[in-house]
Amino acid sequence: MMPTVVFYEKPGCINNARQKAWLAASGHQVDARDLLQEPWSAARLRRFFAALPVSAWFNMSAPRIKEGEVQPERIDADAALRLMVQDPLLIRRPLLEVGGECRAGFDPLEVRLWIGLVAGDGAPYSESCPRTDNHHCP
């Protein structure tokens, strides 16, 4: 039996919808949760980033990043977590939790090696928002 994936998403995000569908097609049960409504703490959020560099913790499509207000490459871990707790749009998504292990982002190869993922449809994969108007999908 495939594991249940707790999937923290931004509701309405096209990429998150595709990722959930891919997980379900791979036999996983997906427990989707609203990343923006989750009561995050710095300690809880930190578990998802493991050995990733701080700059990889961020959603590069977030308005505050695109406008230059937040510069991920210039922020330390503690400051990054404080910002993300205050503004969850800054968090790279999805956040995934399976059996107590947590990860950020959706790299298909890493997900396949971690929990199993069937081959995709051959379309190139990107974490970037596919909409040209990112105001709808930060």
Image: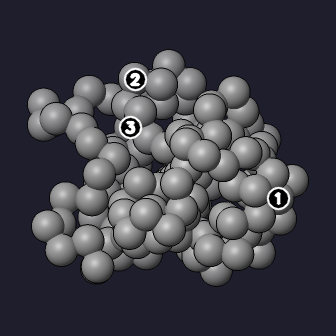
* Residue of label 1: 42
Q: Say if residue 132 shows up in the picture.
A: yes
Contact, mark 1 vs mark 3 (Cβ under 8 Å): no
* Image coords of residue 67 (percent x, y): 38, 69
Q: Which residue is nearer to you in this view: 42 or 96?
A: 42
The type of residue carrying mark 3 is Ser
* Residue of label 2: 109
Mark 1–mark 2 distance (CA, rounded to whole Å): 28 Å
* Residue of label 3: 26
Residue at x 27%, y 42% (from the top left corner): 126
Residue at x 70%, y 75% (from the top left corner): 86
* Image coords of residue 96 (percent x, y): 59, 47
Horizontal side of residue 104 vs 132, given as left or right? right
Q: Mark 1: which secondary structure?
A: helix
The type of residue carrying mark 1 is Ala
Mark 3–mark 2 distance (CA, rounded to whole Å): 13 Å
* Image coords of residue 77 (percent x, y): 75, 45
Q: Mark 2: which secondary structure?
A: helix
Q: Is residue 135 above or below residue 105?
A: below
The type of residue carrying mark 2 is Leu
Horizontal side of residue 122 vs 73, given as left or right? left
Q: Label 1 crowding class (10 Å Cα cut-off): few <14, some 14-19, many 20+?
A: some
